[in-house]
Image (cartoon, rainbow, N blue to C red):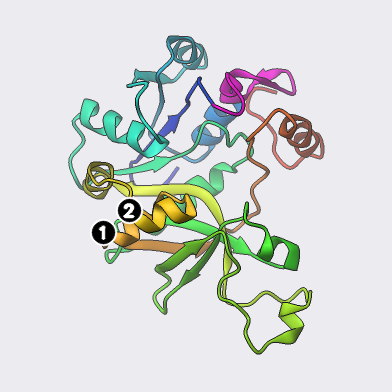
Amino acid sequence: MTEYDYPVVIPARWASTRFPGKVLHPISGRPMLAHVVDRARESGATRVIVASESTTVLEAARSFGVEGCLTSPAHASGTDRIGEVADRMGWDDETLVVNLQGDEPLMPGSLVEQCALLLARTSTASMATLGVALHARDDFSNPNIVKIVTDIRGHALYFSRAPIPFPRGDPGQAEGSSRVRGALRHVGLYAYRVGALRRLVREPPCELEQIERLEQLRALWIGIGIAVESARTIPGPSIDEPGDIARAEAWLDAGHLLSAGT
């Protein structure tokens, strides 16, 4: 258990554009959402809530023994969905909540806890997230892998799909060296203080967010500090499209995670 209380909210949209119904698609014989719920429970969270626009998803969540909260189908992001949950639950602005996405069945519970603890001990930030070291030049160049650079305090300076910081004058890195300095690969996990969450969902998308298609840039744009720490373990792959299911099953079969339901 952790040294303080925090809820985990799992935004679980049924109407995924690329993979409709993916949150209930089976992985190794169990619905994806069941695995995500396991990860939340393993974190030591005192409360787990599944937020969805679909009653089918919420019925499944309740069958897994957690709360369900019906939220608007108009939400553009999981952050918006969690904002609605916070208001429904009447949480005060200092409440700390973790966003564990419904398509992250292989996110270790230990990282959920690490992210929550990071924010709890960081008074100069109102959000927290994690990153992992970048070793492969291909990953550094891949626009589907989001990079983070931080300041001296370990707070996010910028997130980008581009290679940042650009290695000008470092031909070894620029030409394929395994050395990638100055950046982390972002792990899609967030903790928020509810006051900052409410502020974030009230604001319209900013220009940088629209250019990069990265919602977290809105937080930086409006001055919300984001604490960043290196993840203590490597998370498994998230599920974006049907082809990712086999990769997730292979990851489980290799013993990286033992599901609470097996």
Tell me the SS state at disc 2. Answer: loop
- Label 1: few (<14), some (14–19) or many (≥20) C-alpha neighbours in 10 Å: few
> Is residue 262 in view?
yes
Residue that numbered label 2 is attached to: 206
Is tag 1's residue or tag 2's residue first in the polypeptide sequence?
A: 2
* Residue type marked 1: Ile
Q: Toward the viewer: 94 or 81?
A: 81
Percent from the top left, x then y, of residue 192? 33, 48
State left or right for residue 82 relative to residue 14. Answer: left
Amino acid on which disc 2 is placed = Cys
Is label 1 or label 2 in front?
Answer: 2
Q: Residue at x 50, y 41 (%)?
A: 43
Helix, strand or loop at mark 1: loop
* Residue 61: percent from left, percent from top: 48, 17
User: Circle 1 is placed at which residue position?
Assistant: 222
Instruction: Identify the residue at image location x=56%, y=59%.
Output: 161
Q: Which residues are magenta?
A: 17-34
Give the residue displayed 23% in from the left and 25% down from the top. 88
> Given contact means CB atoms under 8 Å apart, are the residues at marks 1 and 2 in contact?
yes
